[in-house]
Image: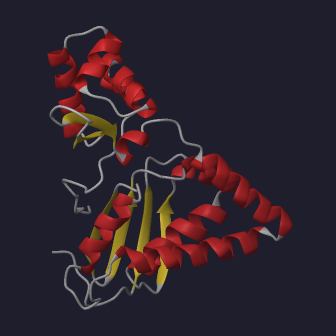
Amino acid sequence: MYKYLSVSKLPRKTLPDQSFLGPSKSKILRLLRAENSTAGDIASSLHIQVSAARKHLEQLASLDFVAQSFQKGEVGRPKKFYALTENGKELFPRTYDTLLDKVVAKLIVRESPRQAESLLRSIAVDVAKSLDSQDLQSGDHVKNVQTSINQLGFEATLNQENGNLTVISRNCPVWKVALKHGEVVCRGYHAELLKAAVKGKSVDRKEWMVDGDSFCRHIITEMLKESKIL
């Protein structure tokens, strides 16, 4: 039985759909999407007390969905304005997967599945190079890589044993595209990313979410000897 290292806190929060925040906070996010506002502006738009609006805004700020700043007008004291953060903007619909799906599909048609996979491998290597800027001799290299991989959305846990590394990924950030294009994406990008990130010699996938498993499990062999999980 494997014992996997987990990351208790990630630098970037996993973003819930705005509907889970409740109707009032969802309306506030939509108002802030249109323009930066004060608590008074929000209260007036929602027909609630300013204190209630301020409480909602402070809670959204604690989740890093809203930021505040003071702006000075022509007269009077500076006013506190609230604005969406990048995390707050990500709560609204995005179509990244649609774009990626079309790009991969065009590559397969115009070139071939093999060429499309080769390009994704190249992209994976480039991404892997950016995951850990520290010296590869550092003893916590794999730990740093795990944190970076989780920032990409894989929710991965890692276990190192006898020079091999077991990686369990419980989320696929490109799930719809992977489901449609299979190995072109999963072998070309995901597997290659893991292998390149820890300087492994080869990678072997055991479980695969595309096949109905609840996670993807990869075994990476002969990884960088100096890297270890602390």
- The foreground one among 64 and 77 is 77
The quadrant in which residue 51 appears is top left
Give left or right: position of 70 versus 32: left
Residue that appears at 37% across and 66% down: 167
Residue 49 in view (yes/no): yes
Q: Does residue 81 lie above or below 139 as drawn? A: above
In this rendering, would 147 be left or right of 219?
Answer: left
Point out the residue furthest to the front here: 75
Based on the displayed image, in which of its 4 quarters is residue 58 positioned? top left
Q: Nearer the viewer, residue 42 or 120?
A: 42
Which residue does the image show at 33% across and 66% down from the upper left?
A: 148
Residue at the image point whose x is 17% and y is 31% from the top: 76
User: Residue 88: percent from the left, percent from the top?
Assistant: 36, 40
Q: Is residue 40 left or right of residue 167?
A: left
Q: Residue at x 40, y 25 (%)?
A: 31
> Looking at the picture, how far across and down is residue 45, in whole percent?
35, 14
**Percent of width and height locating residue 193:** 48, 72
Work out which quarter of the rendered image holds the N terminus and state it: bottom left
Q: Is residue 41 left or right of residue 182?
A: left
Q: Quadrant of the C terminus?
A: bottom left
Q: Position of residue 163 (x, y in %)?
A: 31, 84
Count of labels in the image: 0
Q: Is 201 above or below relative to 191? A: below
Q: Looking at the picture, does residue 202 appear above or below residue 146?
A: below
